[in-house]
Structures are given as C-alpha cells and as structure tokens.
Image (spheres, rainbow, N blue to C red):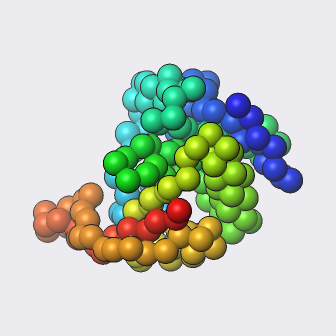
C-alpha cells in the first residue's frame, strides 16, 4: 500500500525504517511534550526489534503502521491500533516537520484510505497541555469526549508526574 498526497508519500512501515524512527524518538525526547508520552527505548536493538514487529503487521487491520515520507525521507509515522470502540491513533513527527501541515495532510489521506477498507471510527488520547496536538486533532474533526489523569514519569522527588489527558473521537 502506498498513498501519494500533494507533498507526501505514505506507505506501510518497513523494517529498514528503524533508524529514521529512532531519530524521531531521539528528537522527541528533547521536546517539552515528551513528559506527556510513554518513553521510547532508543537503543539500536530495541528500535530495530520494535519496528520489525510493526512491519510484521503489514496486511492486518488490527494494527496498522504507516511511514510518512517527504522526498524519500521518513519524517513521521502514524499508527492505528484496533480497540473495542474504534482504532486508536498514535503519531510522531520529527520536529523539523512541525508546523508545515504534514501531519494533517497525512492523517486526512489515511482517513480516506481507511474508510475505503471499512475503518471509520478513530480515538486519540493526548495531554491537554500538548496544544499543538490538540489543535491538530480539532483541525482533523476530532471532538473531546472525556478526560483522564495520566502519569508516565516520576518528578524530581520520586512522585508521579500526573497530567490531564484528553480523550478525542472522530467518527
């Protein structure tokens, strides 16, 4: 599967994409928004194994992993994982690609593609403090349906760093 938008190529993730995904995760770990997400193990073997596992789902509708490429360079990825009430989306783009509309363009193309294969209900969980992500979701037609208290890290005193996460849906 390969989709072409005005500026991007979107394709299934491949095992050889691991280095590019590793660079995206390393870049993201420096972001002020990293504390609102599960930390990624960026060691070579861990990333190589995880991306090989993602690539192994190719052809499945339970777990879908897509590489978003600009001029043959992987700039981000989007994942769709089947849940009881729809497909939950995860995404990450290198900071060099932020603010240029690539995330919106690629999501919209994937929504069209997934609709053709019968997938129409989508969920996203993100920190409400992650305003760029919240704005992206609004521009994609998501609406907030709830909140939850979330923690992925401990603070400097060893206490859970708790933040308010938003639950968003698009149908």
The residue closer to the viewer here, 156 or 114, is 114
Q: Residue at x 17, y 65 (%)?
A: 160
Q: Residue at x 60, y 32 (%)?
A: 13
The residue closer to the viewer here, 52 or 29, is 52
Q: Residue furthest right?
A: 6
Q: Residue at x 44, y 60 (%)?
A: 124
- Report x, y in % for residue 86: 43, 51
Residue 110 at least partly seen: no
- Report x, y in % for residue 106: 69, 53
How many numbered dots are placed on residues in this image? 0
Q: Residue furthest left?
A: 158
* Depicted 13 relative to depicted 68: above or below: above
Residue 77 lies left or right of residue 68; in this view the side is left
- Report x, y in % for residue 35: 36, 63
Q: Residue at x 42, y 43 (%)?
A: 82
- Report x, y in % for residue 159: 13, 66
* Depicted 61 relative to depicted 102: above or below: above
The residue closer to the viewer here, 110 or 39, is 110
* Residue 11 quadrant: top right
Q: Quadrant of the N terminus?
A: top right
Residue 22 at least partly seen: yes
């Amino acid at each position: 599967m390969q989709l072409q938008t005005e500026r991007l190529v979107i394709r299934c993730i491949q095992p050889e994409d691991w280095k590019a995904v590793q660079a995206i995760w390393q870049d993201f770990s420096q972001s002020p928004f990293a504390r609102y997400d599960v930390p990624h193990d960026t060691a070579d073997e861990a990333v190589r194994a995880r991306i090989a596992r993602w690539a192994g789902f190719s052809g499945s509708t339970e777990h879908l992993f897509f590489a978003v490429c600009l001029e043959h360079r992987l700039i981000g990825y989007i994942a769709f994982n089947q849940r009881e009430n729809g497909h939950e989306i995860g995404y990450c783009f290198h900071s060099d690609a932020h603010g240029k509309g690539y995330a919106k363009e690629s999501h919209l193309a994937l929504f069209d593609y997934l609709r053709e294969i019968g997938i129409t209900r989508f969920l996203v969980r993100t920190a409400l403090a992650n305003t760029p992500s919240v704005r992206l979701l609004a521009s994609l037609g998501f609406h907030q349906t709830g909140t939850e208290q979330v923690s992925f890290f401990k603070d400097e005193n060893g206490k859970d760093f708790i933040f308010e996460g938003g639950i968003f849906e698009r149908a």
